[in-house]
Image (cartoon, grey):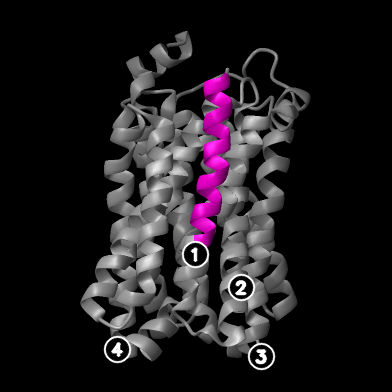
Amino acid sequence: MSGLQKRAEGVHHPGLVHFALAMGGFAIGTTEFATMSLLPYFAPGLHIDEPTAGHVISAYALGVVVGAPLIAVLSARMARRTLLMLLMGVFAFANGLSALAPTYHWMLLFRFLSGLPHGAYFGIAALVAVSVVPPDRRTAAVGRVMLGLTVATILGVPFANFLGQAIGWRWGFAVVAALALLTTMLVALFAPHDRPEQGASPLRELGALARGQVWLTLATGAIGFGGLFCVYTYMASTLMDVTGVGPHLVPVALAVFGIGMTAGNLIVPKFADRALMPTAGALLLLSAAALAVYPFAASSFPLVLADILVIGIGGSLGTVLQTRLMDVAGDAQALAAALNHSAFNTANALGPFLGGLAIAAGHGWTSTGWVGCGLALGGLAIWAISLGMDRRR
């Protein structure tokens, strides 16, 4: 353990540090998922149709993909505590502007700006989280930060959607801006004071791109995680058209999914801290099996809820791969950590795209399960290559 880690542990309580960082995850998770649920409300408010409004969600995702590596490289010489506060400040400002957006094109710009801090925040927050715990609890520390994101799917998203229905969609973005400001204050209070690492530079961070294991880990997430997003995107339509439930029961299924993700981030890291790569492989196998069962379970609401819960547990793969990147990135920790979230946003684009092709080809809503299973198995194949390289060394 480094001298910085020892000083951080001595002065800063890990639980408070993780709570402060998780609050940022809660703010990010709320806006990322709530924007989808607020789409029917802000589309007429901005005088556009819903398909056009969907570009607002794509603009945010593009901001994540662009911002994560760019910020990680350019901020290489900045103290992590300072960077986290700056990222949350920008996030608060951009979401506040989103709440005030006068036109569709301004909204596109503001959502792109909102997405820029996303990946860099999670990447740097993960590094700070592990700096205040022993090495054998790293994945658990990352999992606690990610709990903010998963709890947002249970509490934050429904609350933002409620505000959007009750008093206007703009308040859904305003509450996120308030949460981001709260995070900035909590980070200022509880995050350890640190100094930039000696020798840190943009060029050193770019060294992560020369490491094959970094690319294999990112590809595992970009492909393997696509199955979850493939099913999640079309879950509401599947439940109503195949399972036969009313719209009022769709939020129940979404909450069960969020509970699965939360449970996964509480339980899975305990195994990952003992055997990281085997845990990643087991999660990909579990996801592939649950996604393959989805087409058969969709005809029964109780069965599909149980399956959705398991699919949600598979979402803890993100936490496991975050720790894996710390192991294979060498000195380029910040860039590798931030790229993890670019990879998962790639999965967020790839899964729904391929699922949509299957549905458009006439294979039905449940075909997303088969497509998702294929993606999970694809991620498993890349994981196996990475594991093989480890063993040859």
Please tell me whether the stretch drawn in magenta is mainly helix, strand or loop. Answer: helix
Amino acid type at mark 2? Leu
Is residue 95 shown left or right of residue 323? right
Residue 365 spot, x, y in % from top left: 47, 82
Q: What are the residue bounds of the magenta stretch?
A: 374-392
Nearer the observer, 213 or 137:
213
**SS class of the residue under badge 3?**
loop
Residue at the location (42% across, 27% down)?
130
Residue type at tag 1: Gly
In terms of sequence position, does the residue under pointer 2 or pointer 3 come before the other? 3
User: For mark 2, what is the residue?
Assistant: 100
Residue with the most extreme left position: 302
Q: Which mark is residue 245?
A: 4
On the question of residue 318 being in view, the answer is yes
The location of residue 229, given as percent across then percent down, is 50, 64
Q: CA distance from mark 2 to mark 3?
A: 15 Å
